[in-house]
Image (cartoon, rainbow, N blue to C red):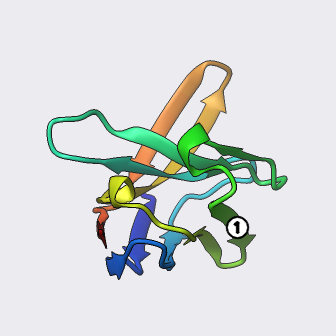
Amino acid sequence: QVKLVESGGGLVQAGGSLTLSCLASGGIFDGDLMGWYRQTPGKQRELVATITSYGTTNYTDSVKGRFAISRNDNPSMVVLRMNSLKPEDTAVYYCNLRHTPRPAVNVDFWGRGTQVTVSS
């Protein structure tokens, strides 16, 4: 069973930086997609950034140029470096691992989340 453990959230002033880390253990396969999502009360969880095992990245438009995602595979870890933080980045951030055992079949694993609060 895949286990994801996040760390690095906290309180920061606008314009500041934070780094989130997620350590993955369990049944991880080459090709699994890893990433970060975030959620605020009353809203759906939204994608922040993802990275493939080949290093291909994808970011939501609002964080492009400010956030950077990276990944190590031994041990399996995904890191999100967040710069120039804005109050609207305030959310619970969740680590995600997506396993695709066969085409069009996705199995998602989630961490418990870590709170990021950006004060104005």
Q: Which residue is mark 1?
A: 71
- Which image quadrant for residue 4? bottom left
Q: Quadrant of the N terminus?
A: bottom left
Q: Nearer the viewer, residue 71 or 117?
A: 117
User: Can residue 27 be seen at all in this image of the molecule?
Assistant: yes
Q: Nearer the viewer, residue 57 or 10?
A: 10
Q: In the picture provided, is 36 more to the left or to the right than 117?
A: right
Q: Residues within 10 Å of mark 1 (few under 14, many from 20)?
A: many
Q: In the picture provided, is 77 more to the left or to the right than 4?
A: right
Task: Label 1, secondary structure: give it.
Answer: strand
- Which image quadrant for residue 45? top left
> Furthest residue to the right?
54
Amino acid at dot 1: Arg
The image position of residue 48, as x and y in percent, is 51, 47
The image position of residue 20, as x and y in percent, is 48, 74
The residue at 56%/23% (across/down) is 105
User: Can residue 60 be seen at all in this image of the molecule?
Assistant: no
Q: Against 120, is 105 above or below?
A: above
The residue at 56%/53% (across/down) is 35
Q: Nearer the viewer, residue 106 or 37?
A: 37
The image position of residue 109, as x and y in percent, is 42, 49
- Which image quadrant for residue 79? bottom right
Q: Quadrant of the C terminus?
A: bottom left
Q: Nearer the viewer, residue 83 or 100?
A: 83
> Furthest residue to the front?
120
